[in-house]
Image (cartoon, helix red, strand yellow):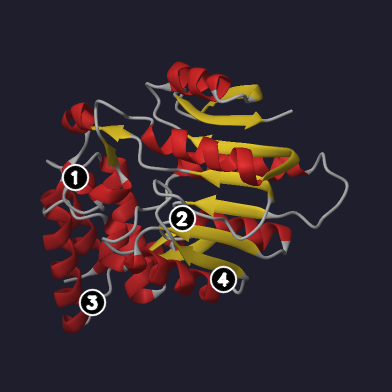
């Protein structure tokens, strides 16, 4: 089978499941992973025959894509903020919306003259937020998560990207103590209500950790309440709290932060036009 025939096979087998643009992305991502090919390499060599062992590898990848397993899990990594992160079914796959949150934090820090920032990420998952911030700012960052399995992945990602991140295992819904006070507390906690499961795709529901996704319909802001309370103790004067939020709960999250005593609350939309990020402070 040639590269061209493999390209056609991707379209044939996956066209009932994924949009064409997504299939194209999958194909070239697999080519890069298996052959270190760019698009120009494919165009120049598309009539070449693929070695049989590589054909078998690609067939297995297609089988998993047909089962709607995320391509990031199949290949074992995801791209985020220009860096590569190992992912598994114990961590959420890093998403573009979270890149926007990281970019907002970086822009916000440009207004501060000093460079010795203290930052903690609560509910770190793959570690994409603290690793990206540590890389951009060239500082050490703290991060916490309840999952030991997620923390093991996050530690590998800090090592892979050559940054200093201090990871701590803790449950922020119980009485906890953070290592120190911070200029920035950032979190992308679980926020998807059970009633929203019907809107979600199989590749998320079946392959990403429910622990990192879902909250009850009765108390969907449970993590925001806990983190807002914690931040009141551990934010430095003029420190900032940043959240990624449920797009349907922007006003409720603002009301919660006001009730907790926060001010200068700003709600931002993501690139898709959904309410997605909040910044707040205590003074």
- Camera-near label (3 vs 2) is 2
Q: Quadrant of the N terminus?
A: bottom left
Label 1 vs label 2: CA separation?
20 Å
- Camera-near label (4 vs 3) is 4
- Camera-near label (1 vs 2) is 2
State the count of labels. Answer: 4
**Which residue in the structure is indicated by mark 3?**
50
Q: Residue at x 28, y 74 (%)?
A: 48
Label 3 vs label 1: CA separation?
34 Å
**Which residue in the structure is indicated by mark 1?**
205
Q: Residue at x 79, y 43 (%)?
A: 110
Is residue 48 depicted above or below 7 in this figure?
below
Label 4 vs label 3: CA separation?
32 Å
Disc 1 or 2, which lies upstream in sequence? 2
Mark number for residue 124? 2
Question: Quick check: marks 1 and 4 in contact, CB under 8 Å?
Answer: no
**Which residue in the structure is indicated by mark 4?**
161
Question: Quick check: marks 4 and 3 in contact, CB under 8 Å?
Answer: no
Q: Is residue 173 visible?
A: yes
Q: Outermost residue toward the right? A: 113
Residue 30, x across and y down, in percent: 31, 65
Disc 3 or 2, which lies upstream in sequence? 3
């Amino acid at each position: 089978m040639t590269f061209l025939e493999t390209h056609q096979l991707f379209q044939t087998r996956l066209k009932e499941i994924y949009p064409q643009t997504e299939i194209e992305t999958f194909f070239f991502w697999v080519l890069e992973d298996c052959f270190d090919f760019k698009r120009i390499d494919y165009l120049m060599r598309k009539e070449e025959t693929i070695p049989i062992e590589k054909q078998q590898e690609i067939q297995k990848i297609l089988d998993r894509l047909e089962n709607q397993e995320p391509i990031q899990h199949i290949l074992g990594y995801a791209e985020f903020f220009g860096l590569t992160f190992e992912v598994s079914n114990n961590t959420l796959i890093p998403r573009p919306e979270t890149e926007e949150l990281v970019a907002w934090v970086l822009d916000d820090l440009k207004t501060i003259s000093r460079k010795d920032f203290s930052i903690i990420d609560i509910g770190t998952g793959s570690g994409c937020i603290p690793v990206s911030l540590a890389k951009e700012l060239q500082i050490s960052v703290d991060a916490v998560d309840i999952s030991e399995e997620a923390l093991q992945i996050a530690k590998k990602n800090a090592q892979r990207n050559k940054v200093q991140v201090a990871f701590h295992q803790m449950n922020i819904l119980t009485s906890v103590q953070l290592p120190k006070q911070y200029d920035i507390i950032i979190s992308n906690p679980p926020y998807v209500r059970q009633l929203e499961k019907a809107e979600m795709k199989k590749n998320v529901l079946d392959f990403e950790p429910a622990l990192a996704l879902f909250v009850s319909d009765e108390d969907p802001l449970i993590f925001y309440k806990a983190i807002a309370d914690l931040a009141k103790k551990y934010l430095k004067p003029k420190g900032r709290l940043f959240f990624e939020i449920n797009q349907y709960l922007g006003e409720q999250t603002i009301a919660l932060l006001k009730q907790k005593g926060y001010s200068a609350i700003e709600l931002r939309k993501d690139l898709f036009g959904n309410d997605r990020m909040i910044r707040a402070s205590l003074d």
